[in-house]
């Protein structure tokens, strides 16, 4: 009877004992200055992604009848109106074709070179910022790992200083899990940044494909009217 009562009391105490919990905020605050660096990198990655996403979305807008309208203006001898249409459209392919319109009358090979050079400039503008995002994707896990290594060094340094007095297992394990937090943070930032980078590269390829299509349509149009 006493054994049953003792077991019941032990179970009750176990059920009512406070359970340790760990939130994401707790983890973040235990990572030290490395977590601040990772926070800055994550905010920078978010800024680059949002700004490039909006830029690529605007650049991807397509007017299916754009080249036909340009052709009508050129046939009517209204090249300035065609240039004005390009300025009003304000997309990478429109700015590219505008350069070609300003060279009408020159050899077709010269016009093509001008258009292609303008296209390369536009692609360069759209790519701006992507190398930084790629660097964050590759560097954040390494920074997190650096925080883990330095944390482990501190943990084992404390263990060595404990000497013959014995090692506080709770203190040692706490130092180790705090050190591992930075690896988790670095991996999270790096993985998210990697997916964001690949998505933007795919969108950039789509815009580049549309620019190539518009270039071919424009050059075909010039061959027809001249």
Image (spheres, helix red, strand yellow):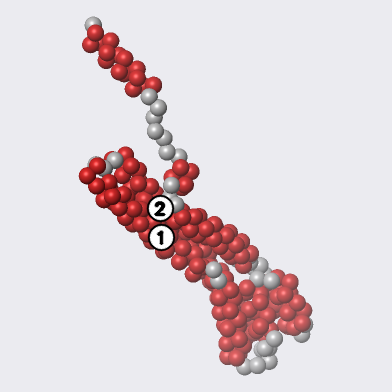
**Nearer to the camera, 36 or 109:** 36
Report x, y in % for residue 119.
Answer: 58, 78
Residue highlighted by disc 1: 143
**Do the CB atoms of the residues marked 2 and 1 lie less than 8 Å apart?**
yes
Q: Can you see residue 81?
A: yes
Q: Can you see residue 191?
A: no
Residue highlighted by disc 2: 182
Residue 186, label in figure: none
Q: In which quarter of the image is the N terminus?
A: top left
Q: In which quarter of the image is the C terminus?
A: bottom right
Residue found at x 62% / y 74%: 93
Earlier along the polypeptide chain: callout 2 or callout 1? Answer: 1
Residue found at x 30% / y 53%: 157
Q: Please determine whether, in this image, residue 115 is positioned above or below residue 4.
A: below
Report x, y in % for residue 77.
Answer: 76, 85
What is the CA distance from the residue labelled 2 to the residue labelled 1? 8 Å
Would you say 44 lies left or right of 84 here? left
């Amino acid at each position: 009877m006493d054994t049953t009562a003792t077991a019941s009391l032990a179970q009750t105490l176990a059920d009512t004992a406070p359970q340790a919990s760990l939130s994401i905020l707790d983890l973040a605050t235990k990572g030290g200055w490395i977590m601040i660096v990772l926070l800055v990198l994550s905010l920078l990655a978010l800024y680059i992604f949002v700004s490039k996403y909006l830029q690529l979305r605007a650049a991807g807008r397509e007017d299916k009848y754009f080249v036909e309208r340009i052709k009508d203006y050129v046939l009517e001898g209204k090249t300035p109106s065609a240039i004005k249409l390009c300025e009003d459209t304000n997309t990478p392919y429109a700015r590219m074709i505008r350069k070609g319109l300003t060279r009408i009358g020159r050899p077709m090979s010269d016009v093509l070179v001008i258009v292609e050079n303008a296209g390369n400039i536009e692609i360069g503008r759209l790519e701006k910022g992507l190398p930084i995002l790629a660097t964050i994707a590759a560097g954040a896990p390494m920074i997190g790992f650096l925080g883990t290594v330095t944390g482990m060094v501190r943990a084992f340094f404390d263990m060595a200083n404990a000497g013959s007095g014995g090692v506080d297992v709770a203190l040692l394990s706490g130092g180790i899990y705090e050190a591992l937090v930075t690896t988790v943070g670095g991996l999270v930032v790096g993985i998210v940044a990697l997916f964001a980078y690949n998505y933007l590269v795919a969108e950039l390829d789509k815009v580049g494909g549309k620019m190539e299509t518009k270039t071919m349509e424009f050059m075909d149009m010039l061959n027809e009217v001249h």
